[in-house]
Image: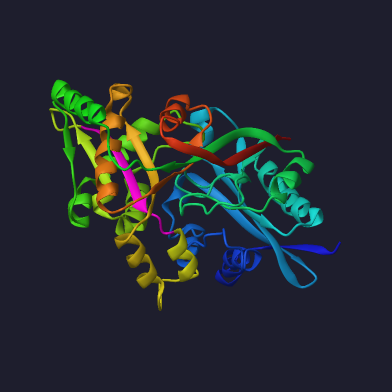
Amino acid sequence: MLVTIQPCDSISDLKKFVQFPYDLYRNNKYWVPPMRADELQALQPHTNPAYKNSEAQFWIAVKHGKVAGRIGAIINRAYNEKAGTHLGRITRLEFIDDKEVSKTLLDTAEKWIKDRGMEGVHGPLGFTNLDHQAILIEGFDYLPSIASEYHLPYYKEHMEAAGYKKEMDWVEFRLKLATEIPEKALKLNEMIQKRYKLKVIHFNSQKEMKHYAPRVFELLNNAFGELFSFVNMDKELSDFYIKKYFNVLNPKFVKIIEDENGNLIGFIISLPSLSEAMQKAKGKLFPLGWYHILRALKKPRVVDLLLTGIHPDWQAQGVSAILITELQKVMMEHGVTHVETTGIIETNEKAINHWKNYDHIQHKRKRCFIKMF
């Protein structure tokens, strides 16, 4: 066999695993590289608290002396217990356009998962819903947000050839921001706030914003609890993501809402697009990565909507409309012209129909596949 598989059992192996997509997508104008240090941190038990409820293994495929692909396998015990399933996950799958390579990678991960008593495999999925998930199957000519994924068109064909079928899709929208907010919308939001005695919290500093971060994750667990593939995040895991993501947020683009008793009932987290900045940074903060990122945060033209969460008791009460209107005010002040949503599960009709009220295109689709043994 021309393809050999190497388990990633050392830091040197993991660095090769992390490096492969940088080689695969070299000179691709749509791929947005993650930070190498963040990727390495996510793959190791001593730096990723998600391992408390999971076990994982990673491999690279070598052909003709060169790395030709990579794959990871995860068994998330907390998810299986919650969902009543016995499924493993493939994760971080990347490969050249060679079916021998993709099949060898998938066979290797499947065997590892099956040997641990699982009845099937799905993915790509990460350790959590804030990790890498799904394969891009539509929208190859659009730049993704840093919270989304990019893949090459042949991935879908390879997955289907290996016996995988669709389990779930996510769709993404690009919205054109209006030059003004309709007076009717402003009055409606004011009426909702007065009726329910709601308070919108605005932030001017990261210190103010981080004070609310643990409560945001508590609400995230409540709001996302029933969504596909989601598992609640405990304090240690929440702190991990707060440290990872909140340091790069522009606090003005984060809004939360409290009820009259001071309970957090909704949040929206957005970020001036860092996609082009991350391309310039090439996966490293130094020497110039920080400069490109800080510049993008201060002078945005595109904003990425990362997360929106509404407490189940307050859904369909107009809370999301208030959050979006307050955020739109900030975006207009900064000269933002377009908004990118991150993936929305295709069964979330309320969210999808909401974005269709805007001047929009539905331009990207990602897919999670499944295969039973």
124, above or below 85, in the image = below
| 269 drawn magenta | yes
> Is 93 or 251 nearer to us in this picture?
251
Would you say 117 lies left or right of 299 here?
right
Percent x, y of residue 335: 30, 53
Q: Name, please, the residue furthest toward the bottom.
A: 287
Residue 321 in view here = yes
The quarter in which the N terminus is drawn is bottom right
- All told, the count of numbered labels is 0
- Which residue: 13% across, 27% down? 260
Q: Main secondary structure of the magenta part?
A: strand
The quarter in which the C terminus is drawn is top right
369, above or below 64, in the image = above
Percent x, y of residue 225: 41, 31
Give the magenta-colored segment's residue range.
264-274
291, above or below 316, in the image = below
| 96 drawn magenta | no
Choose top left, top right, bottom left or bottom right for residue 293. Answer: bottom left
> Is 203 or 174 nearer to us in this picture?
174
